[in-house]
Image (tube, grey):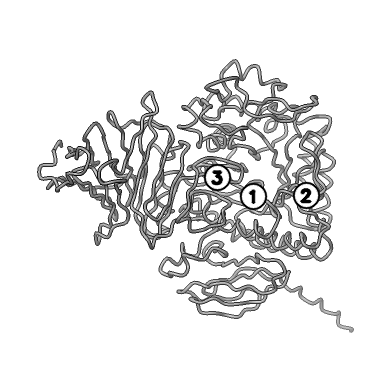
Amino acid sequence: MNQPAETPSPVSLAQSSPTVGTFRERDGALEWSGRQETVLIEPWGPDAVRVRARLGGPVLDGLPGALLDDPPATGSTVKIEDGHGQLTVGALTVDVSAEGGLRFVRTDNGAELLAEERAHFWWPGPRLYTAVGNGYHRLEQRFTAYDDEKLYGLGQHQHGRLDQKGLVLDLVQRNAEVGIPVLTSSRGYTLLWNNPAIGRVELAGNGTRWVADSARQIDYWITAGGPADAQRRYSAVTGRAPMLPEWAAGFWQCKLRYRTQDELLAVAREYKRRGLPIDVIVCDFFHWTHLGEWKFDPKEWPDPAAMVRELDELGIKLVVSVWPSVSPLSENHPVMEQRGYFIGTQYGPVAHADWPDKEVASTVQVAFYDATNPGAREFVWSRVRDNYLVPYGITSFWLDAGEPEIKPGFQENLRYWAGPGLEVGNMYPRENARTFHEGMLAAGETDIVTLNRSAWAGSQRYGAALWSGDIPTDFASLRRQIAAGLNTALSGIPWWNTDIGGFHGGNPDEKEYREVMVRWFQFGALSPLMRLHGFREPGMPLGPEMTGGPNEVWSYGEEAYEILATYLRLRERLKPYVLKIMREAHEEGLPVMRPLFLEFPEDHAAWSVDDAYLFGADLLVAPVLTAGATARTAYLPAGARWTDAWTGETYEGGAPVTVDAPLDRIPLFLRDGAVLPITEPVAEPVAEPVAE
């Protein structure tokens, strides 16, 4: 159907060349075009649409993005009449004005969820295309701001805010700052900016603006519904996480760094000697011969087969650090450079960072493999497969520095296989995880977990776990991780963790830091993944010989050790519950770590709680986040009855409660009579033999 807007709404004469466009119906989609711009609105799953807009021709298919190629099937209704167009998909209706302005409303009552807004009554409109050359534009998409709106998601950040209304956030990947451009609103919609371009989002009081510094078209997806349904819809169109293997739900031991095979095995043996639960131990960086050779250095790791065999006998999984950077000293560098497997540059050589390497006194200029290049992914996986998987059966990898960690971080100088750095740079960490996911599947492996320092929309479908990067080691940093984890959860990444105790420093012999470690360890035991890591004092300069201070649970004194061991055992008892809620993430797309409002959207107060969370549906966790605290006040959502998991005392929801929180206790509350093995079982007394 091709139909002009015959009776357009009045337009202001002050506007710059007001346009009455043309509407078309295209196989259940609605298209508007005018003044060389095309806007296509398509059904994209239940209660959801995808919007694409381009200046200078029809919208383009096949551009890099987060959405799966085939959306879930759904019906739609298109109406074109009285100078307007309308597309309805379930609970979401899109109204399009004669001038091409979009307004998203609830189908049942017409209430506005979100609307485009002009920047100025004259020029520009809500969509701005500023040419940067060769068909690319700096793109701006503006929406109305609402005074009472709260906004969540957008990946992982260290600003400490759960509600991000009022912030300006760069859409870029950096250590500890992970840009995932999906936003959940308290008004009842979730929006994905389906564009891996470098840019920013402005959540101002006078408007919301999404910006891509250089791209070819505007592309976003929006769904109507509460936060839980929105997570189901979003994960269905970007991909759901695989089912977490049982071993990954337990305790991960790590430090910077175990320098030798003997060091690592000694730690694993000591955990078992003490009878402590442990499922994973991690082999960190510089275990390699050269950066980018992806194999053990035989001087420090003389018999990896024997090491893996012993760890298997102990019931411990080995995870190995794999970096995407390649030293010029690596045997792989010449062939990768010749085949074009490195990220290119617009100006200069393919060198992106300086980094120490073995057998050289100074740093060298390293390149990064281009994870957007299928050939480069296959090559890197072939090296990993032949050096780790095939000879030793190592099947899980730590993908560090995968932003990628270029220095300086000018994406505009980079040229990827998938496109210019400014257009596609944010997708690199997702494609890096894809290398290992596709490689493992091809090798017949199905339990796929990678630990990543960065991510993008859709990373979860490749089995990517995210951690919060190289963060400080104080209570303020611990406090910020609650919001970081919850916003990550609302960005579609269910597998998340922090370095327990923080990363940069921390003295195991200091009383003050031991308290931080205990409180962080309690939080870690109730996180989606539980991993102890850090660069403890005394540290050493960056280089192949470096290591940090001790970072095992017995490294923090006897009082702390007893508490940490208690929470190791708690995590072990909770593993069946952890796996249950991981299955909900796999099957439904619901996060493991949940803001209170995800389960209680009708409780207005729940939308503001940023210092506690739900672990699955049944357990409310209120970490202690201040030094010296022996009590904790926590808000319990209305609509449920809550039981203190330690004391058995019950409370009606809808009000804050204050409970005891001595050093050995993290406040936990069970929902509506849920039963979980929080307290340690009491040993049955041994009956004395009866004398005959």
Which residue was labeled with disc 3?
Answer: 178
Is disc 2 placed on a helix, strand or loop? loop
Residue at image location 45% in from the left, 67% down from the top: 600
- In primary-sequence order, the first of circles 3 and 1 is 3
Is disc 3 placed on a helix, strand or loop? strand
Query: Does the CB distance between marks 2 and 1 fall below 8 Å?
Result: no
Is 499 placed left or right of 433 in the picture?
right
Front residue of 121/602: it is 121
Which residue was labeled with disc 2?
Answer: 536
Picture quadrant of residue 360? top right
Distance from disc 3 to disc 2, alpha carbons, whole Å, reads 24 Å
Q: Where is residue 657 in the image (x, y as percent from the top left)?
A: 57, 77
Distance from disc 2 to disc 1, alpha carbons, whole Å, reads 24 Å
The circle on residue 248 is: 1
> Residue furthest toward the top?
338
Q: Position of residue 361 (x, y in %)?
A: 80, 26
